[in-house]
Amino acid sequence: MTRSLALLTALAATSAASAGIADVRMSEFRIAQPGLDVDQYVELVGEPGTSLDGLQFVVVGDLEGAFPPDQNGGVEIVVDLSGVIPEDGIFLLASPSYSLGGADQIANLDFEPGENLTFFIAEGYGGMVGDTVDANADGILDKGAISVVDSLAVLADQDPDGFGSEFYYSDTTIGPIAGFSPLHGWRCSDTLVWRPGSDAVGGVNETPGLPNATCDGGGGPGPDGLILNELRIDHSGADNDEFFELKGDPNASLDGYALIAIGDGAAGSGAIESISLLDGYQLNAEGYFVGAKSTFTLGIPDGIFDDLQFENSDTVTIFLVLNFTGELGGDIDVDDDGVIDAFFWDEIVDGVTILETCEEPPTTTEWGYAAVVVPPDGIYAAGGIFRCEPSGDWTIGGFSFGDYSQEHTPGTMNIECDSVGCGGLARSCFEAQDGPGCSDIVICELVCEADSACCSAEWDSNCASLANAYLADGDPPAVAINEFRTKQPGGDDDEYVEIIGDPGESLDGLSVVFIGSDGCEPNGVVVHQYNLIGQTIPGSGYFVMGDPTLSLGTGSPDYPIDIEIIDGGNLTAALVWNFVGARGGDLDVDNDCTLDATPWASTVGDVVAMIGDSSGNCVYLNAIEVGPDNIYTPAHVYKCASGEWDFGAFDPSLGVDTPGLANLECGAPPALCGDSAAGDCFEIGSAGCDDEVCCDLVTSLDPFCATDSWDETCVSHALNMCLPLGNAPEIRIAEIRIDQPGADVDEFIEIRGEPGTALDGVSVLVVGDGAGGCGSLEVAVPLGGVTISGNGTALVSTDSFTLA
């Protein structure tokens, strides 16, 4: 920990000035690199011709072998400098293995990365490696220990206690970066501010032996175009992945900036709930900065902020501000009227409000204070948002890890908007629009293949004419929506819509539409529209449009497409003929539960509405109402074998989803357990089996056997759990591998016993600290049907096993 060095600095400056070397200073360094550390160096700058005789380069870290706190102040490197500053004003001290060019002096630079190090240019230092400059380990240089010309602390821990990490001895610091000391650092040639560089050799600002970059607009104060670029304020499970990302000029300084979160406190709206000061940080070489908790799993952040307090399930405003002077709990809106009264900053650089509800405060929620507003994600505040490329429009991300881990790109360019040029809200493809693109992504991309200007310049009357040419002639086919799922526990990997009809029937001219609330507009919004042009009913008579990850029913959908059906509120689902409206269009402007417009020729088949008791929005088109499921809108809706509509379970493992297969009767059990038509429990077949007791045992352990198929694992479970009990075989575990460098492709457990011994009834169990904490069952591998081989072993291994 550094203490006040004002007196020391003054004395050092006086000493240096008297020697005529006050202008010699460090300007760049590298202490390590990925792989072998061959290119360590320290660059000095000064007046050309200045002699370096009598100066030393000294590194202070810890004393090897000393017990804390006596390790503090240990001298690790001493180099007597020699020669003069060259004509270009740059002097390079480098290790013997240095390979990046010529050096002015060679010396052993055995830096110890990963700990606090203090670099000194000293005058007349007579000590050696192993000495101490802090004999009483108080974090202050001993009097007269070093006559300082220049100093820099390279930090892995900016708040050391002298025990777990070493003190440092300079007011000029660099690092830490994501909990580590920077491997490379450079000093702006205009502002003399230190900036961390890239770990890898050859970064954009690594210029040993050459002049350093300036920092006006590229590393110094006031980066141009600095914006908020990504945010994650909530997600399923513990909030380990909360983070913020900034975007701007590469290597731009963040000195003077702060990220604050505004929510509610005891006194009402406007409370400052989180403060992240960004002094000492900078954007990376690509122009991004990621701040996150130490539990972050989506990459390595540029700054650790374990005190991030992004409140869940509330309206939250995030501001990036300049010269913040406030404190936690401070109130920016004293009279709770939605107007900022107290400005604890000089400037709001960027901001966004994430709404929990569109109802106006203060009755049920808090005020938002940013000009840019992200509406609710269904009935909840969005858990994560990002600016999609290239438009920069804020986009709501998924709530579960499986979704947001694919959408967030911390530290690199964000993902593209839904089909660049296509997919915008409330832009009918069948009418001329200002600007490029339209809402129906399928039609839009077809049109833009014929006329690229429709997606790059203007969606004019020619583009609209091309779109109208894709409308179908004649009457719609005899097809109908038969089943759909909109949500499930965890990631929504199994959303789908099933349509039935005669095999080979074309679905050209048809669209699936969902009408409900977009979060702020309460009624009549076309929240989803999926065009089925080019699709055909398969030979089974069941057409499934669904997530590529769909694992229910027959598995892979006929039309793989990312479906993100809105969660919350009544939702009317219809199959419509020749849709000419737009996703995001409001069909019930006055919110009287009657559609003002029906931008389609006709509906096809049943129109179904999912109903929830807590949902106040409308139902349309005389839809068949299904639900509520307790007080919620159902997650799964299907047409029973008898023709009525019903809803299934929120959890597919407990439900009756059959996408691609015939629907079950209303109220049917989740699996065909005990049905005489089901297969034998000891043979591979469809989900369920004929022995009800055995089937219930197996499906309770492995829901896949109830929802998908009765595969080899289900059969093995049955062999273990359902055969008559007997004595356990005489076997033992003989060898285990649980880890290896790189991918764990060769994990295995070897079991030994008498050759020919049947392992029916035996399971390999791995108990650890899974989701349920200590004692959680992490792995269960049934060995039913397995026999000890002729060499007396049975091997349980991964599919990728390479050792046998």
Image: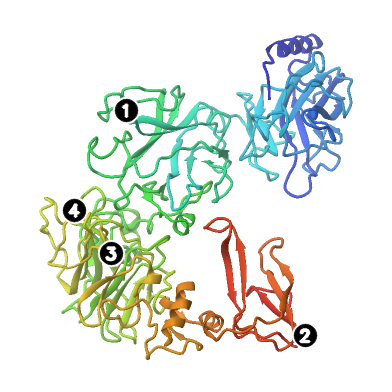
Q: Residues within 10 Å of mark 3 (few under 14, many from 20)?
A: many
Q: Earlier in the sequence, mark 2 or mark 4?
A: 4
* Residue at disc 2, secondary structure: loop
Task: Establish if 536 lies above or below 181.
Answer: below
* Residue at disc 1, secondary structure: loop
Q: Which amino acid lies under the numbered mark 2 shown in the image of this protein?
A: Asn
Q: Which residue is mark 1?
A: 267
Residue 703 occupies quadrant: bottom left
Q: Earlier in the sequence, mark 2 or mark 3?
A: 3
Q: Measure how far apart labels 2 and 4 are at the Cα level.
A: 69 Å
Select label 4 or label 1 by which is in front. 1
Q: Measure how far apart labels 3 and 1 are at the Cα level.
A: 38 Å
For the residues labelled 1 and 2, say whether their Cβ atoms are less than 8 Å apart: no
Q: Measure how far apart labels 4 and 1 are at the Cα level.
A: 30 Å
For the residues labelled 3 and 1, say whether their Cβ atoms are less than 8 Å apart: no
Select label 2 or label 3 by which is in front. 2
Q: Earlier in the sequence, mark 3 or mark 4?
A: 4
**Residue visible at 62% across and 78% down?**
762
Q: Which residue is mark 3?
A: 634
Q: Residues within 10 Å of mark 1 (few under 14, many from 20)?
A: few
**Residue visible at 47% across and 77% down?**
697
Comparing 443 with 663, the one in front is 663
Which numbered circle lies on residue 616?
A: 4
Residue 553, percent across and down?
A: 39, 78
Q: Which residue is mark 2?
A: 791
**Residue visible at 32% across and 76% down?**
534
Q: Which amino acid lies under the numbered mark 4 shown in the image of this protein?
A: Gly
Residue 154, percent across and down?
A: 70, 31
The answer to whether residue 221 is left or right of residue 627 is: right
Task: Establish if 375 lies above or below 501.
Answer: above
